[in-house]
Image: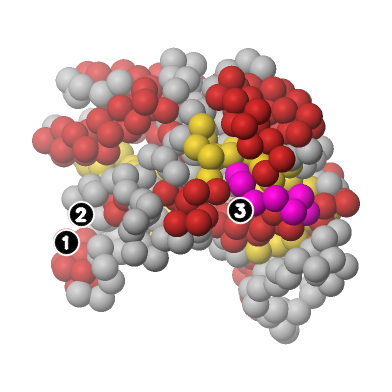
Amino acid sequence: MERSSELYARAKDLMPGGVNSPIRACLSVECEPLFIKKGDGAVLTTEDGKTYIDYVEGWGPMLLGHAHPDVTKAIQESAANSACFGAPCLAEVELAEMIVDAMPGVDMVRMVSSGTEATMTALRLARGYTGRNKFIKFTGNYHGHGDPFLAAAGSGFADLAIPGTPGVPSGTVQDTLLVPYNDLEAVRKQFETNGDEIACIIVEPTAGNMGLVPPVEGFLEGLREVCDQYGALLIFDEVITGFRLSYGGAQKRFGVTPDLTTLGKVIGGGMPVGAYGGKREIMDRVAPTGNIFQAGTNSGNPVVMAAGIATLKVLRDADYDALEARVAAFAKELHAIIASKGVDVTYNTIASMFTMFFTNEKVTHFDQAKACNAKMYASFYQQMRAQGVYLASLGLEAAMVSFAHTDEHFEKTLEAA
Ligand code: PLP
């Protein structure tokens, strides 16, 4: 058995940063990752045989937990029978149907292979459809690593890409109008000055990437209104919120319908996936019906689609209210354990990490969220380690905490969850 630290040393020679871990890279967290050998529900076992609880669902995709039997079975069956990858398949149609049925703003959908691909294509589509170039993007919202200008604009991930950084086209940076999250007045001001140049607003309808910040009352409705007034498109980036805040995503939960929606994470059941969809007349602009090219070798891959269908079937029958209540109860329990360890960490921080179901009411703006997150990512790890509590940043970028070796209480918590 190879210890995680030995594996990390081996990996560091092969990969910058040692593993694929955007969180560690962007926040410059120096923390040894854990290498996971096995996942089962919320419990993960490392290569060194330690067990951990994953409380961010592998950073989003594993809403049903790791190795859910239905999903595993669907993947196995599809992999054993898929004759051809990169070709049209029934599973793609079935997953598309499930997404269209669930999401009020999605009349048509296209599969891609990541959330990044979904947001990049949606933005390209918005530009093509409106014939305008500028975008409104909110401080602290994250939309993937595909386009430096999006990353540049205050995504909260340190200097992921800043104007002047080699490789960042300054033109696109200038096209990004950066506005504070939840600040409708600032959005209106941008439209008053740049109204006929703005192609779209892209927004996380609950900002998962800045600490689970919900929209303040009237914010999403206001965005819808201003887009309608100026002929711009409203894009909901539901890569995190889709099928999580409700079966139909944030748009169903908050009752505001966007023009375009981007998806990822959950809809692949842990397999690499993304999707973008929206109103028929806009989606019709995608080739071959329209002139906006998008197609990928692995888009609609049958194994990925099968995993997504199996996942959505479970979620379709789930009682989201009951799940949310259960998660809130678990979060409370977890906070109590952490407090008993004397670890100085805010309620918000844990809540935001713990689960995307947990609506955090105390944080409404990026600066607060950033302060929480910075605290968490920097000192929380160290404090927990110092207490003998294992906390790690995975290659998956997930943060996990385990009390298994140090606290009997954990066992009870786990059972209760
Ligand atoms: N959009 C949001 C809201 C995200 O949270 C993420 C990833 O965390 C992305 C887009 C990018 O998705 P992916 O990592 O699959 O490229």
Residue 371 is covered by the magenta coloring: no
Give amino acid for label 3: Thr
Q: Are marks 2 and 1 in contact (CB under 8 Å)?
A: yes
**Which of the two discs, 2 and 3, sits closer to the camera?**
3
Residue at numbered disc 2: 32
Is residue 371 in view from this perspective? yes
Mark 3 CB lies closer than 8 A to ligand 1: yes
Q: Residue at x 21, y 38 (%)?
A: 378
Which portion, as a residue range, is magenta?
129-135
Q: Looking at the image, is 153 positioned above or below residue 186?
A: below
Q: Looking at the image, is 219 positioned above or below residue 37?
A: above
Find residue 85 and report its horizontal and vertical position in percent: 68, 80
Which disc is residue 72 wearing? none
Tell me the element at label 3. Answer: helix
Foreground pick, 344 / 400: 344
Residue that extends furthest to the front in the rendered view of this protein? 193
Residue 134 is covered by the magenta coloring: yes
Give amino acid for label 1: Ser
Q: Residue at x 63, y 25 (%)?
A: 188
Find residue 320 and report its horizontal and vertical position in percent: 66, 29
CA neighbours of label 3 inside 10 A, class few (<14), some (14 to 19), many (20+): many
Residue at numbered disc 1: 5
CA separation in Å, label 2 and label 3: 31 Å
Q: Residue at x 74, y 54 (%)?
A: 131
Q: Earlier in the sequence, mark 2 or mark 1?
A: 1
Give amino acid for label 2: Glu
Find residue 82 and report its horizontal and vertical position in percent: 71, 79
Q: Looking at the image, is 182 positioned above or below residue 99?
A: above
Find residue 256 and report its horizontal and vertical position in percent: 75, 28
The part of the image, by quadrant, that contains residue 184 is: top right
Residue at numbered disc 3: 119
